[in-house]
Image (cartoon, grey):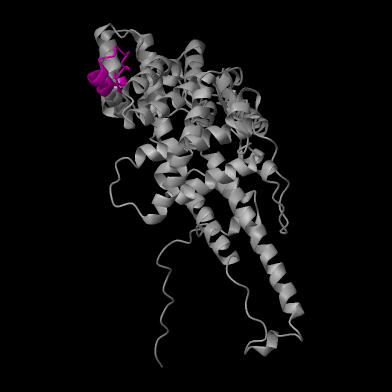
Amino acid sequence: MSEMVPRRPPSRQDTPLPVVWYEFLLNPNLLQQHLSKDDPDPNAVQLMAHFLGNVCLQQSAQQLPPPVLGGQNTEFNFGNGIAAVQNNVTTNGVEKKRTKMLKSLALQTAAHLDWNLNTIQNNLPMHLGHGLLKDFLKCTEAPIDVPLESLDISDMYDPPALALITYHRWCIRLLVSESFPAKPTKPSTLQGLGYIIDSLENSVLLLESILNIERTIALPSHVKIQQLANVSIDAQTEPMEKELEELIVNSVELHCQIAYDLGSLYFHHNKYLDAANKFSLVSQLLPMISDPVYCFIDLPKFTGYCAACRHFKDIPMTMPSSKSLHQEIEQSRRANYQGLVDLLIADNKARQTPITFRNSLEKEVLVSGSASLYFEVCTCNAIHHVLSGIPVPTVYTEMLQSISDQQWNFLFKTCWLCSEKGPKHEQKNIKTFLRDISCAYRHSWPLLCNSDVKQLFSDKEILEITKQQDIAQLALSAVTVKRQRTDEYT
């Protein structure tokens, strides 16, 4: 009798399968649950492309002629075919409903990306990007048929105002990017470009008008898009999430981004004086923007535009500062470390300097003899480790055993400054770090609860950590009493 062959173990660990795009049709709340993960698979850009691609497929299917009734398959031919016609009408209704849901999901994904045109334009082909932004106009009921002379965008509701601005920005950016095609342009692309070229004057007039008004615009969140789209679904889903706090784009950001886009267009149309005027405005506004929400400018390309305009027209312009944080930190070293801590905090957000450089800087400050500055530099470097997902050096955690309340406050303040507007996975890293040190050094917890970084924790999490602190304190007290009694007997 042959021996029983043992069952072969699985070749890999059981891991959850990636979510498939059509699962989001069944539960609209699944999209934000998925995108809130640290590293979602598929990511937001991939999902947006899937949603829009399937919108095209659905629309193509809806344009096909209906099936011929009374064919060879008599099983489905009921009498005179009336039932089959009704079934076909029902199917078309379901398909249209599915298309509407797919468009809504694509717009919600774009909202998750904060309507970043760089991301949309770099990752979607022209016809998908155009379709997305046309759906944005339709969803927000933007007045696309109103003559520009009677269009007042200064008092317009935020969603349609942003939809108009974003659509017309995309139009002129597309024409600029197509000025130097890397490969022969497809006929379908040429047809789409022809439509955009015909409406170019309207795009320029609208964007120029924005530069003459002062207003802020809230970026519509995914919840706002759900409300505007008013998509109903048959599947049972969770109640719609509460309205999120929307990101606000101030007039400085708005003017800076629009001036850059218009300047790029003017430059490629050989209107160098107009381009220079717009780029001059950009160079004035850029220093006023610290944490951009909507304005993302390619600085090397912008510097090249400015240099070219000066060459062609000899126009005095304020050139943007090209100093990197690494260069500014080097300058601080030569100035007796003036402003060094603020630069390190800024670098914790930008992550421009290598950790090896920061470690050598830490040793250099130690030799300088300033204990307070040394602790602050070590703290900035430790938080840099935490944000990057790297273990904090043991030397630093041991240093925390003997620091003052003022130094604890500096640690908590720096954690907050570096993570306040950061991505969720970095905030999660900071929370884990703070939870660990509060357990190791329980006297620091009350100080943390009185700092701004407390806002990273929910009320439930704070209550949970406080209970853990109380239990640990009771356990420590019990151990102390036991030792005292042991000492008395001995």
Which quarter of the figure has residue 487? top right
> Quick one: 292 or 180, which is closer to the camera?
180
Extreme-bottom residue of the structure = 1
* 490 in relation to 48, above or below: above
Residue in the image at 56% along x and 34% along y: 164
Residue 8, given in percent of the width and then of the height, sits at 41, 74
Residue 410, given in percent of the width and then of the height, sits at 48, 15
Residue 65, given in percent of the width and then of the height, sits at 60, 72
* 474 in relation to 81, above or below: above
Q: Is residue 235 magenta?
A: no
Q: Is residue 440 visible?
A: no
Q: Is residue 51 visible?
A: yes
Residue 314, given in percent of the width and then of the height, sits at 25, 15
Q: Is residue 314 magenta?
A: yes
> Quick one: 161 or 53, which is closer to the camera?
161
> Quick one: 21 or 301, which is closer to the camera?
301
Which quarter of the figure has residue 98? bottom right
Residue in the image at 42% along x and 28% along y: 262
| The C terminus lies in quadrant | top right
How many numbered markers are drawn?
0
Residue in the image at 44% along x and 61% along y: 13
| The N terminus lies in quadrant | bottom left
Q: Which residues are magenta?
A: 306-325
> Quick one: 104 or 333, which is closer to the camera?
104
